[in-house]
Image (tube, rainbow, N blue to C red):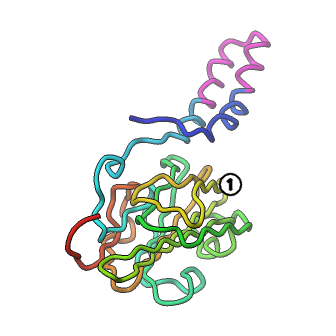
């Protein structure tokens, strides 16, 4: 099932104004043509169900937090990755992708930090540390070892607002909806070196479904 996120309401209302004005002016053809704009805006905020909504997720897997295209997968990039040793997956979301974001891993949210910034194109290296963004850090104990996953919502040239609907201290599940970014953006995911990356540059990923990294197997499931 596909629903429309509540953030669609104000944007769709604004997009509908030209069609309404055309209709009031008696320009029926123009009104019908302009009526496609609010429909397109509403569809941007579509929120489809995903496999992680209906199944128990393996505690060893990290799933994609966003729909889009992998633009980098490898060692943490200087100036992009948090301090320390990390592996990194960066995902670019076009205006045509679903923009509802999901948690790549389940556990306790240790940190949720919003940082204001610029609106550079999301595919540029500089956007990772100069653009408006929210950093989220998840920790989870598995077999007595604490695992940490760091991920980042980054708005881009078209996207001018990041929406985060979770807070530090909350317990979240893998694939859970955590917010969205408006109109074209980027998601970065950072996992420790012991987790194996399972995607490559150019791959298409689906939020809550595509496995992007995996830890060595543990006994049992969450």
User: Residue placed at 63% from the left, 41% from the top?
Assistant: 7
Residue drawn at (33%, 70%), measured in percent from left and top? 199
Q: Is residue 132 magenta?
A: no
Residue drawn 31% across the image and 68% down it: 59
Quarter holding the C terminus is bottom left
Magenta segment: does it hold 32?
yes
Q: Which quadrant of the view contains residue 32?
A: top right
Q: Is residue 64 above or below residue 143?
A: above
Q: Count residues near mark 1 (Cα–Cα under 10 Å), then give few for <14, some for 14-19, many for 20+.
A: some
- In the image, residue 57 sits, relative to residue 46, either above or below, namely below
Taking depth in this image into account, of 142 and 93 the one nearest to the observer is 142
- In the rendered image, the residue lying farthest to the top is 26
Q: Which residues are magenta?
A: 17-38
x then y, percent, for residue 57: 30, 59
- Above or below, 3 against 82 in this view is above
How far across and how far down the image is residue 115, in percent?
70, 69
In x, y percent, where is residue 14? 73, 33
């Amino acid at each position: 099932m596909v629903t429309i996120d509540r953030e669609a309401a104000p944007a769709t209302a604004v997009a509908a104004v030209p069609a309404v004005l055309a209709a009031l002016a008696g320009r029926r053809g123009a009104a019908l043509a302009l009526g496609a704009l609010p429909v397109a805006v509403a569809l941007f905020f579509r929120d489809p169900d995903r496999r992680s909504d209906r199944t128990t997720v393996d505690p060893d897997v990290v799933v994609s937090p966003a729909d889009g295209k992998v633009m980098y997968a490898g060692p943490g990039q200087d100036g992009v990755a948090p301090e320390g040793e990390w592996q990194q997956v960066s995902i670019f979301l076009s205006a045509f992708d679903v923009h509802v974001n999901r948690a790549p891993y389940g556990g306790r949210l240790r940190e949720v930090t919003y940082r204001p910034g610029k609106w550079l194109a999301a595919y540029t290296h500089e956007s990772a540390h100069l653009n408006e963004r929210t950093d989220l850090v998840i920790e989870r104990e598995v077999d007595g070892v604490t695992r940490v996953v760091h991920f980042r919502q980054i708005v881009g040239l078209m996207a001018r607002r990041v929406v985060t609907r979770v807070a530090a201290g909350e317990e979240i599940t893998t694939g859970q909806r955590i917010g969205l970014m408006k109109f074209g953006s980027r998601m970065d995911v950072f996992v420790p070196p012991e987790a194996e990356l399972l995607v490559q540059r150019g791959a298409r990923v689906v939020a809550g479904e595509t496995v992007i990294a995996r830890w060595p197997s543990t006994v049992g499931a969450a």
